[in-house]
Image (tube, rainbow, N blue to C red):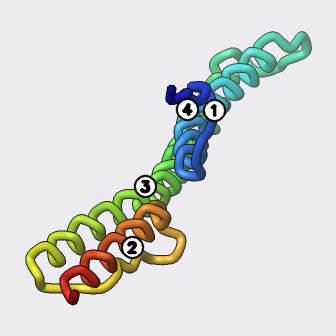
Amino acid sequence: MNERCPTLKVKTKLQNQLIWMIFAAMSIPTLVLGGSMCLMIARLSAPNTTMSPHEVIVGIMGYVAVLFPVSIAALLYWVFRGTNKLVGPIERMTQELDRRMEGQKSGPIVLRPGDQLIPLVDKINVLLEERDNLKKA
């Protein structure tokens, strides 16, 4: 009988990277907004404050207006770089396999260093090599 691994277990490097991307995409904006709210509440409830509530809120919102878009832009940049290392190899493999099926190209599929799915491409390359050897025989 095939035993399944626990659901909440990270099984691959790719899964780990995707989990961290999702976690960062949720937590960083939450920390920026939550931290701003805590700071605003702390300043508004300070006993010796000389600032009006409006001045405190406007001051905090200035930080939020800068930090929130910067954190979102940084997250988007990081996520695009990470997903390109996944989507790029899939597109490359699809194109390369199409060329081989049409007989236009032979040999192994080559990915960029650092791309995800290199173990999968290595196995596909073994199959392609076996296929080429059968054609030659």
Residue type beneath disc 1: Lys
Q: Nearer the viewer, residue 12 or 4?
A: 4
Q: Residue furthest front?
A: 137
Q: Which residue is mark 3?
A: 83
Distance between the alpha carbons at the discs numbered 2 and 4: 40 Å
- The image position of residue 33, as x and y in percent, is 61, 28
Of label 3 and label 4, which has the lower sequence position? Answer: 4
Q: Quadrant of residue 96?
A: bottom left
**Mark 1 or 4, closer to the camera:** 1
Q: Are the residues at dot 3 and dot 4 in contact (C-beta closer than 8 Å)?
A: no
Mark 3 vs mark 1, foreground winner is 1
Question: Earlier along the polypeptide chain: callout 1 or callout 4?
Answer: 1
Real-space Cα distance between discs 3 and 1? 21 Å
Between 48 and 105, the residue placed more toward the observer is 105
Q: Residue at x 36, y 67 (%)?
A: 124
Report which residue position mark 4 lands on: 26
Q: Secondary structure at mark 1?
A: loop
Asked if the residues shown at circle 1 and circle 4 are in contact, with their CB atoms under 8 angstroms apart, the answer is no
Which marked residue is nearer to the observer: mark 1 or mark 2?
2
Q: Which residue is mark 2?
A: 126
Identity of the residue drawn at 43% across and 62% down: 120
Which residue is tagged 1? 9
Whichever of labels 3 and 1 marks the residue nearer the N terminus, that label is 1
Query: Identity of the amino acid at label 2?
Result: Val
Q: Amino acid at mark 3?
A: Thr
> Residues under labels 2 and 3: Cα distance?
26 Å
Q: Position of residue 112 (x, y in %)?
A: 45, 77
